[in-house]
Image (spheres, rainbow, N blue to C red):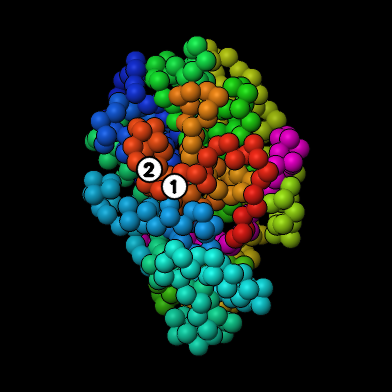
Amino acid sequence: MEPHPDAFAGPAPALPAAADVAIVGGGIAGVFAALFLARRGLRVVLCDKGPIAGEQSGRNWGWCRQTLRDPAELPLIAASLRLWDDPATTAGHATGFRRTGIAYLAATAEDEARHAAWAEAAAPFQTGSRLIDPRATAALLPQAARRFRGALYTPGDGGAEPARAVPAAARAAAEAGAAILPFCAVRALDTAAGRVAGIVTERGRISAPAVLVAAGAWSRRFLAPLGIDLPQAQVMGSVMRTAPVAGAPALSLAGPRFGFRPRADGGYTVGQAGATILDILPDSLALLPAFRPAWVREWRRLRLRLGRRFLEEARLPRRWSPDGPSPFEAVRVLDPTPSRPILDEAARELARAFPAFAGMRVLARWGGIIDVTPDQLPVISAVARLPGLWLATGLSGHGFGVGPGVGHLAADLIAGRAPLVDPLPFRWDRFAQRPRVSPTG
Ligand SMILES: Cc1cc2nc3c(=O)[nH]c(=O)nc-3n(C[C@H](O)[C@H](O)[C@H](O)COP(=O)(O)OP(=O)(O)OC[C@H]3O[C@@H](n4cnc5c(N)ncnc54)[C@H](O)[C@@H]3O)c2cc1C
């Protein structure tokens, strides 16, 4: 598997019999929630079916951006950037976070209109983003071989190293007292008298009055046996990393059919912004009513595929006994095959726009399954019909940047503290109403 997230080398704790909060999922949402809950003195246990950050949180581009984010999420990303900035957040364990700046290039009039509409909607949030003209764009990117119509540029945006950041936060959480248990699948939620009573793991039961489901692309499947219908679809992203490239830009950039982030190792993480594959899955029909507005709006960008993923998903049971192996043990890590055509096109377009990349050496390619909600906003919320159940999921393809804030907000709500930001846009019951369509896509 590539990438290899830093091994979480914490002490291997025994399975605790009880905790105040049990967390399902060791991606960025679950790990940061564990960290902030443990720092408040709560007894926390976190289980992942595989390694820490083995799925999306260790496979993403590493962008931490305000640019083109739904305005409903801007307070959360602002708070998250402050958390990323502060080494004390992860008790000094390095995440590789840097504010390098991020620019979205405008190649068409449609790009310009989209950037201008977002800049206007985001104006009250003081993101520091600015629309720059062709001359300023050329000055920002002297390495470019062609001229662009302009760019939407946010100097305060940045990135962190996905392979390092979440294991770093897991180390800090363990130091704060959380029990972090990789390779310990949670088979089911335990309920008693109409409320949450704990979790059933492959190693045994843990009683807990509160359970946070932060299971990424698995959250829908995990919640289904409880009769909780989380509208969550999956798309596949493809990424590659290069050896060091001399003379390439030092900021992160999204251009026509390419995108990249400078890595701490001197190489680049490269892909195509928005070029994801929507696999048709056994569940797709059931999700159609909730996702129709989003899929209709994005039909030109959607690459539909009926293939291996359908069979893989169809083979997984929808019902299982907590006393026997579950689908979560059957698939320790979602490790899809990346799309070679998408990556080859990205490499070609990148080299055309920035000749420094022409001879770039690709060291690895990988895929990642991204979970999305109909409005592309996360769910960070209680579920009223099952007291004790909390969700931090549906981070919708841009959850790495806001991950520290997602975990902090989930911890605030569970601990009954003042929330980091207004949690209203992220409540669970919004799906009972008409789905809202994101203005940014
Ligand atoms: C190719 C790609 C590029 C991306 N680029 C960016 C980017 O540049 N910037 C950005 O902000 N975001 C980006 N994202 C999105 C971002 O990575 C995700 O939004 C974020 O990492 C989701 O975090 P999570 O904790 O919700 O889920 P995950 O990281 O998927 O973690 C969920 C964890 O739950 C575990 N789990 C599931 N079920 C169980 C169970 N029953 N028992 C125990 N464990 C369980 C899984 O093993 C997994 O480790 C990208 C994603 C991909 C794939």
Which residue corresponds to the image point at 50% horizontal and 11% vertical from the top-left? 193
Which quadrant holds the C terminus? bottom right
Q: Is residue 385 above or below residue 111?
A: above
Determine crowd level at label 1: few under 14, some 14-19, many 20+ residues with C-alpha closer than 10 A. Answer: few
Disc 1, ligand 1: is the CB inside 8 Å? no
Query: Residue 314 lies in what quarter of the image?
Result: top right
Q: Is mark 2 within 8 Å of ligand 1?
A: no
Segment colored magenta: 263-291
SS class, disc 2: loop
Check disc 2 and give the amino acid type: Pro
Q: Position of residue 3 (x, y in %)?
A: 46, 48
Image location of residue 303, percent across then percent down: 71, 54
314 to the left or right of 129: right
Q: Is residue 44 left or right of residue 325?
A: left
Compared with 96, 393 (above or below) is above
Whether residues under marks 2 and 1 lie with C-beta atoms below 8 angstroms apart, the answer is yes
The residue to which callout 2 is attached is 419
**Is the residue marked by circle 2 packed among few (<14), some (14-19), or many (20+) residues within 10 Å?**
some
User: Residue 179 shows which numbered tag?
Assistant: none
What element does badge 1 sit on?
loop
Residue underneath mark 1: 422
